[in-house]
Image (cartoon, coloured by chain):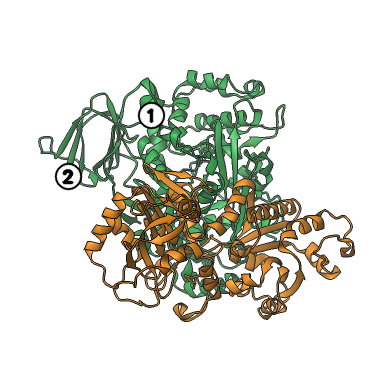
Chain colours: A green, B orange
């Protein structure tokens, strides 16, 4: 099948943004002679064409997401999500039926915004099969998972005992392959396990009360492993001291801990607070942004907060537990899991008139505006922690339009308005920059060479938006979405299913690890590693494949 | 391996041959649906395409459809939910009455919990609440929780446990204590114990009177795990009991570490899959393909109770059982009710599709009893050659 798109402006952040023909030949984008025949042709004057959006950090599958669904049935409102808005707003994306919707709705809403790949950032080692099963049931999206390490007791023991780095590299490689993940994530290094020993605080240079090692050692060791294994995505780090005033010090110490290796700081907004100001809580976004601007080995995703009801879910049980009294409604779930993972689920309402909540909103925007390179700062809300992913179009408008941004800012708590530097940041993102931060940047950060751009050979995952003065409206509803060259969505109608793929890291595994880890698993957890190993054939079906 | 009958770790060679008390016990509780099954004709081994066509016609003609039974695998749960959505059916598992004792409490109060293997590896005190029926139903529980660290783990049995039960825990290395008491009083007794500033056990007014030595052991525990099995909680309004237990656990976590390990029923896998596919853990009725949740109104008992008198073909129960070792089946049962008791009678129009046993005859992904680990269970052997799985039948009926 050959499809030719005429008359639209092609934007990918690599080449010049210009009107040109774009040809989708089978599953790829390719050049064809101008007079060659296409099976389908679309004349799309007044439109832009971009590659499919990539969400580098969104909680869409796995135990904690399902636990949140279980906890909050009262938040499900299918009438809200199914109601068509009237009048000129009819092209705007409908809200989710719940902050943690069912899998089919997640896939549907992402595609409705022009996203075609999403990455679950917290796959628990013992629970990877569930994550993959949920992502398999999320239609239209390519997916991948980041494996949660850095609290697993075996790793902590080995670090304490000073085993050779090669042994740890082999372990990390084995775990990645066994759980079919594409990257390694650390959440509050050592802190989840320390909480199981009733330790309620652990900063980067504090000692784990049982293992007598520090998060700094864990971060350094794991970043070495990630580098040695040649993983495309750097160590993906949720820093220590989530949400605490003054946590910028821990964030800076985290960056130092990896000793110059590549590092991705996730939901950075939640990790750049100073302890100044009238309420002892203030922005340190400039410090983190300066550091990112001066160090090309760093990238961040923001985890922007938007106002309204959501649910926070995180592997960081220590800090989720600390926030238990902030839950609205007043209920929460905390789980301690084997392989020393955990999860905390807290429903939460961000209020515009609340000082700290308003401050978080400004800090996220500040980070976006202060980090200069849109290829190293990615648009996320840490769905659903900061806000549901359906708020992306609104967030894009905030970044592209200073006046609109200030109109929201003017409704925040007066002390936020007095203390925030946001009014002085006049930057307005260009369309090209938005496309970079939602497509090309995440693709490069994840090593997805065939995604994120419109160059020849790229996957034909292509989105067509009608140009509009209002970017929120434009990014709410594409006119068309192609997946692997097939038109799957047009003008609000879902036309067809499409092949999905699971992105998995291609790492070499030391077979000696099989026996060693099997013995350890049997002794510690009472079962064989066979029970948790996800085989490649489990990720393949008639409409699903693996992408190495 | 994971036993596909009880979702527990099991080292038995041939699961299919096991006379598992848990399975037997749960079958006894399967009364309402068992009464449907009891009247079915002998299973047919050969089912041709014509029967599928007839079944689809029946389904299309039906006004009310209930999907229920024992769904043990992810594949069948997916197929059952898709089937229910297609036919705008109500879906609820056979043991949801037990499942929802925990679910209702969690949805009101939240939860502090621990996974089975984490508790095994880390917990130094287990408080097991129930009676001997719990161990009869879950005979592998002590072994599954034993970390192989003799005398380092203590188990406190609260309820109506026999001396033999304590011996069972001791035999796998636990320092076992038993305090006989009425299970209903356990939440208040634990709360009283926590509140007391005087740590002398002789001053307790509660029925639960631990010895001083045990009292000290409980007070010194660094990580306490509370185990109960909703299936074996034979008390009225058990969800309120569970809620009070969860509140006690939450309070204890203010200063120490403590977590619940609520043992799930066989429906754990269905509950998980239904949650990610619909947003709800079961008891869902589909209307125009949209799931509607009512934890009280959409139970299979309520559905059956609401079956209009005199109707037969209009109401169909799709009854699935992929766990039974000898007669797994998927049935379409036309039903009618008569009299105030709403006694179900088979109309003779039932259609029966023999199915493979999940995890024994076909590969199945099954959640462990704590619902945190989804294990792939490979078939040990096929009882019936070329037999289809329940998921395959459901997919065929959804065409």
Disc 2 chain ID:
A
Which residue is depicted at the point 41% across and 32% down? A94
Query: Residue A114, can we see it?
Result: no
Assess disc 2: are there few (<14), some (14-19) or many (≥20) residues with their C-alpha within 10 Å of its C-alpha.
Answer: few
Left or right of B389? Residue A428 is: right
| Labels 2, 1: one chain | yes
Q: Quadrant of the C terminus of chain A?
A: bottom left
Locate residue A392, reporting x and y percent: 45, 33
Which residue is depicted at the point 45% across and 61% down? A179
Left or right of B62? Residue B168 is: right
Q: Which mark, residue A84?
A: 1
Left or right of A5? Residue B270 is: right
- Name the residue beneath numbered marker 2: A1
Locate residue B272, reporting x and y percent: 49, 55
Locate residue A84, reporting x and y percent: 38, 29
Q: Earlier in the sequence, mark 2 or mark 1?
A: 2
Q: Is residue A284 above or below residue B364?
A: above
Q: Quadrant of the N terminus of chain A?
A: top left
Q: Is residue A128 above or below residue A52?
A: below
Which residue is depicted at the point 41% across and 45% down? B286
Disc 1 chain ID:
A
Query: Residue A547, can we see it?
Result: yes
Foreground of the two, A55 or B302: B302
Q: Is residue B1 above or below residue A405?
A: below
């Amino acid at each position: 099948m050959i499809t030719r798109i005429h008359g639209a402006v092609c934007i990918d952040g690599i080449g010049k943004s210009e009107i040109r023909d774009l040809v989708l030949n089978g599953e790829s984008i390719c050049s064809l002679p101008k007079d060659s025949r296409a099976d389908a042709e679309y004349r799309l004057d007044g439109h832009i064409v971009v590659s499919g959006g990539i969400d580098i950090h969104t909680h869409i599958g796995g135990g904690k997401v399902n636990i949140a669904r279980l906890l909050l049935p009262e938040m499900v409102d299918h009438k809200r999500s199914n109601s068509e808005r009237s009048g000129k707003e009819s092209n705007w994306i409908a809200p989710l039926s719940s902050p943690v919707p069912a899998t089919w709705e997640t896939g549907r809403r992402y595609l409705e915004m022009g996203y075609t790949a999403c990455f679950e950032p917290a796959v628990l080692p013992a629970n990877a099969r569930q994550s993959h099963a949920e992502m398999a049931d999320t239609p239209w999206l390519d997916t991948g998972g980041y494996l949660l390490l850095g609290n697993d007791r075996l790793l902590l023991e080995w670090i304490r005992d000073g085993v050779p780095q090669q042994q740890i590299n082999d372990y990390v490689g084995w775990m990645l392959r066994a759980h079919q993940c594409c990257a390694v994530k650390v959440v509050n290094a050592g802190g989840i396990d320390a909480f199981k020993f009733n330790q309620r605080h652990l900063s980067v240079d504090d000692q784990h009360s049982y293992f007598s090692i520090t998060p700094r050692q864990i971060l350094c060791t794991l970043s070495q492993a990630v580098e040695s294994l040649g993983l495309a995505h750097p160590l993906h780090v949720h820093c220590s001291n989530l949400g605490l005033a003054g946590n910028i010090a821990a964030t800076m110490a985290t960056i130092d801990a990896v000793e110059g290796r590549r590092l991705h700081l996730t939901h950075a907004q939640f990790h750049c607070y100073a302890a100044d100001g009238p309420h002892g809580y203030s922005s340190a976004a400039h410090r983190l942004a300066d550091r990112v601007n001066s160090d090309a080995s760093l990238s961040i995703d923001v985890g922007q907060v938007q106002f309204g009801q959501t649910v926070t879910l995180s592997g960081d049980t220590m800090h989720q537990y600390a926030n238990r009294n902030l839950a609205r409604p007043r209920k929460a779930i905390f789980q301690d899991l084997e392989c020393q993972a955990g999860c905390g689920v807290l429903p939460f309402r961000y209020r515009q008139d609340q000082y700290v909540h308003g401050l978080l909103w400004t800090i996220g925007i500040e980070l976006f505006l202060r980090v200069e390179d849109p290829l190293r700062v990615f648009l996320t809300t840490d769905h659903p922690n900061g806000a549901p992913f359906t708020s992306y179009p609104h967030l894009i408008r905030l970044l592209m339009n200073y006046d609109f941004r200030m109109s929201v800012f003017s409704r925040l708590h007066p002390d936020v308005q007095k203390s925030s530097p946001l009014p002085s940041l006049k930057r307005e993102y260009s369309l090209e920059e938005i496309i970079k931060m939602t497509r090309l940047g995440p693709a490069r950060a994840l090593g997805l060479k065939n995604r994120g751009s419109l160059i020849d050979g790229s996957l034909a995952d292509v989105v067509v938006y009608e140009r509009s003065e209002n970017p929120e409206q434009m990014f709410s509803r594409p006119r068309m979405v192609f997946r692997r060259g097939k038109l799957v969505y047009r003008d609000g109608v879902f036309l067809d299913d499409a092949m999905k793929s699971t992105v998995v890291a291609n790492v070499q595994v030391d077979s000696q690890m099989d026996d060693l880890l099997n013995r350890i698993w049997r002794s510690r957890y009472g079962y064989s590693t066979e029970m948790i190993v996800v085989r490649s054939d489990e990720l393949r079906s008639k409409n699903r494949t693996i992408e190495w | 391996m994971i036993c596909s009958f009880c979702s527990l770790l099991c080292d038995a060679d041939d699961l299919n041959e096991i006379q598992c008390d848990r399975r037997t016990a749960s079958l006894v509780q399967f009364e309402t649906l068992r009464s449907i099954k009891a009247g079915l004709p002998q299973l047919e081994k050969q089912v041709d395409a014509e029967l599928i066509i007839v079944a689809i016609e029946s389904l299309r003609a039906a006004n009310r459809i209930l999907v229920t039974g024992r769904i043990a695998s992810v594949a069948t749960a997916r197929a059952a939910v898709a089937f229910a959505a297609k036919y705008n059916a109500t879906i609820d598992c056979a043991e949801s009455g037990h499942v929802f004792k925990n679910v209702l409490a969690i949805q009101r109060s939240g939860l502090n919990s621990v996974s089975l293997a984490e508790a095994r590896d880390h917990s130094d005190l287990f408080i097991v609440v129930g009676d001997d029926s719990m161990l009869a139903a879950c005979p592998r529980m002590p072994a599954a929780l034993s970390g192989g660290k003799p005398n380092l783990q203590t188990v406190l049995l609260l309820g109506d446990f026999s001396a033999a039960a304590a011996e069972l825990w001791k035999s796998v290395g636990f320092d076992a204590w038993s305090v006989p008491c009425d299970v209903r009083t356990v939440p208040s007794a634990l709360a009283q114990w926590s509140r007391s500033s005087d740590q002398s056990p002789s001053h307790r007014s509660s029925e639960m009177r631990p010895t001083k030595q045990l009292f000290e052991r409980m007070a010194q525990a660094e990580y306490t795990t509370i185990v109960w099995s909703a299936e074996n909680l034979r008390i009225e309004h058990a969800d309120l009991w569970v809620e009070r237990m969860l509140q006690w656990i939450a309070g204890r976590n203010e200063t120490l570490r403590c977590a619940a390990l609520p043992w799930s029923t066989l429906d754990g896998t269905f509950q998980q899959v239904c949650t990610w596919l619909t947003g709800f853990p079961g008891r869902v009725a589909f209307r125009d393909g949209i799931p509607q949740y009512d934890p009280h109104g959409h139970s299979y008992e309520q559905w059956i109770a609401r079956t209009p008198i005199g109707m037969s073909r209009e109401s169909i129960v799709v009854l699935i059982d992929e766990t039974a070792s000898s007669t797994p089946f998927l049935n379409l049962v036309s039903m009618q009710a008569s009299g105030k008791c709403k006694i179900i009678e088979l109309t003779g129009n039932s259609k029966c599709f023999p199915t493979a046993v999940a995890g024994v005859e076909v590969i199945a992904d099954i959640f462990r009893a704590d619902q945190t680990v989804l294990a792939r269970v490979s078939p040990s052997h096929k009882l019936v050659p070329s037999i289809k799985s329940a998921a395959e039948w459901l997919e065929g009926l959804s065409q």
